[in-house]
């Protein structure tokens, strides 16, 4: 085919590439590369979409940040101005008296340490349990494997409130009332974590496991030497989820814990509300201290968290 009959050709003029197109009437039109009307139209449409998406994300982010900002501003206000200046987004007087009063009147440091222990213990224990169980259900063939998995998922449909009394009686029999283990142990069985980790492992190449078994590696060797390094993004994602879940949990620690020195932050904050005269200045201040570690944790592990979600369920069985 001759160049004249081509619908579109490209020729180089110096550092610039010209795009030439023949119209239906035989006339020839040229545009610098990348400046074709259709291309410009698509770029403009793509630019508009990015602007709209960015604006929507900014609006949603502001809506989520406003409550925390108001919480922080309230903690920096004098106690008698918290609700008097509730409509203002900047305190007329900035003071740290609420923080001093919180540390003087409450064992906030002990509550914070208890929350860290419970969050870390629950996250580590749950990761061990769900990772081992997910490996067995995803990569080891045995009878009724899928049936067991479906049964575990079905347990998620049971409301946790339905299990409160049986779990409480079990903790009494195990002498775990008013202990950290009494809060952590019932949280180790995590159906969602098992589902997430199993789906992640199904995306791992089966050839790696078959080769390891051919080389004589035991299942424990495969698990710790092959599986754990390959599922680090998923481990980071679940570590954040488990930690935040335990950090924010109120109901179960409130039932299990009896002494104030064993309270986590969530339970300790409820004691500041009181029965007749709530100390909202202390509540706001304690809430700020409770939110900051969560934000730091997510900021430090945000990349692993996003990678874990992005790779969730990819690949073949």
Image (cartoon, rainbow, N blue to C red):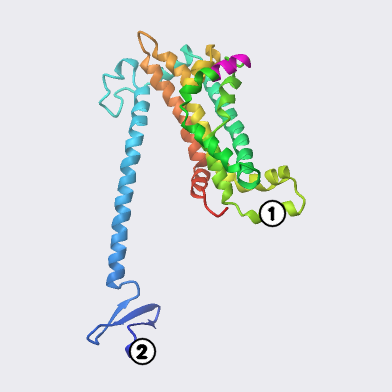
The residue where tag 1 is placed is 210
Q: Does residue 53 appear anywhere in the picture?
A: yes
Q: Does the magenta-highlighted stretch encompass residue 158?
A: no
- Closest to the observer: 239 or 199? 199
- Residue extending furthest toward the bottom: 2
Q: How far apart are marks 1 and 2 (CA)?
A: 56 Å
| Circles 1, 2 touching at the beta carbon (< 8 Å) | no
Residue drawn 22% across and 86% down? 25
Residue 65 horizontal side relative to residue 310, left or right: left
Q: Does the magenta-highlighted stretch encompass residue 170?
A: yes
Say what secondary structure mark 1 lies in.
helix
Which image quadrant is residue 133 in? top right
Residue drawn 67% across and 54% down? 208
Magenta-tinted stretch? 167-174
The residue where tag 2 is placed is 3
- Choose the circle earlier in sequence order: 1 or 2: 2
Query: Dot 1 surroundings within 10 Å: few (below 14), some, or many (20 or more)?
Result: few
Residue drawn 29% across and 51% down? 52
- Residue extending furthest toward the left: 25
């Amino acid at each position: 085919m001759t160049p004249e009959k081509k619908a579109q050709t490209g020729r180089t003029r110096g550092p610039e590439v010209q795009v030439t197109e023949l119209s239906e009437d035989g006339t020839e039109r040229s545009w610098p590369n990348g400046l074709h009307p259709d291309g410009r139209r698509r770029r403009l449409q793509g630019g508009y979409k990015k602007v709209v998406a960015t604006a929507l994300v900014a609006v949603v982010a502001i809506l989520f940040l406003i409550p925390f900002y108001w919480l922080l501003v309230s903690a920096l206000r004098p106690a008698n101005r918290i609700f008097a200046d509730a409509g203002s987004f900047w305190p007329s007087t900035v003071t740290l008296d609420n923080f001093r009063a919180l540390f003087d009147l409450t064992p906030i440091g002990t509550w914070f340490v208890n929350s860290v222990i419970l969050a870390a213990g629950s996250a580590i224990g749950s990761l061990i349990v769900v990772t081992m169980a997910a490996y067995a259900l995803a990569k080891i063939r045995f009878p009724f494997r899928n049936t067991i998995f479906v049964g575990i998922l079905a347990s998620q449909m049971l409301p946790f409130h339905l299990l409160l009394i049986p779990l409480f009686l079990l903790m009494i029999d195990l002498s775990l009332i008013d202990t950290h283990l009494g809060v952590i142990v019932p949280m180790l069985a995590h159906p969602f974590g098992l589902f997430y980790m199993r789906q992640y492992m199904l995306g791992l190449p089966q050839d790696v496991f078959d080769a390891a078994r051919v080389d004589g590696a035991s299942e424990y060797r495969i698990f710790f030497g092959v599986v754990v390094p390959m599922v680090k993004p998923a481990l980071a994602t679940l570590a954040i989820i488990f930690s935040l879940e335990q950090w924010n949990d109120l109901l179960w620690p409130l039932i299990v814990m009896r002494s104030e020195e064993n309270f986590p932050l969530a339970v300790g904050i409820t004691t500041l509300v009181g029965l007749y005269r709530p100390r909202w200045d202390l509540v706001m201040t304690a809430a700020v201290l409770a939110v900051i570690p969560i934000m730091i944790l997510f900021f430090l592990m945000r990349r692993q968290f996003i990678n874990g979600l992005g790779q969730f369920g990819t690949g073949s069985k």
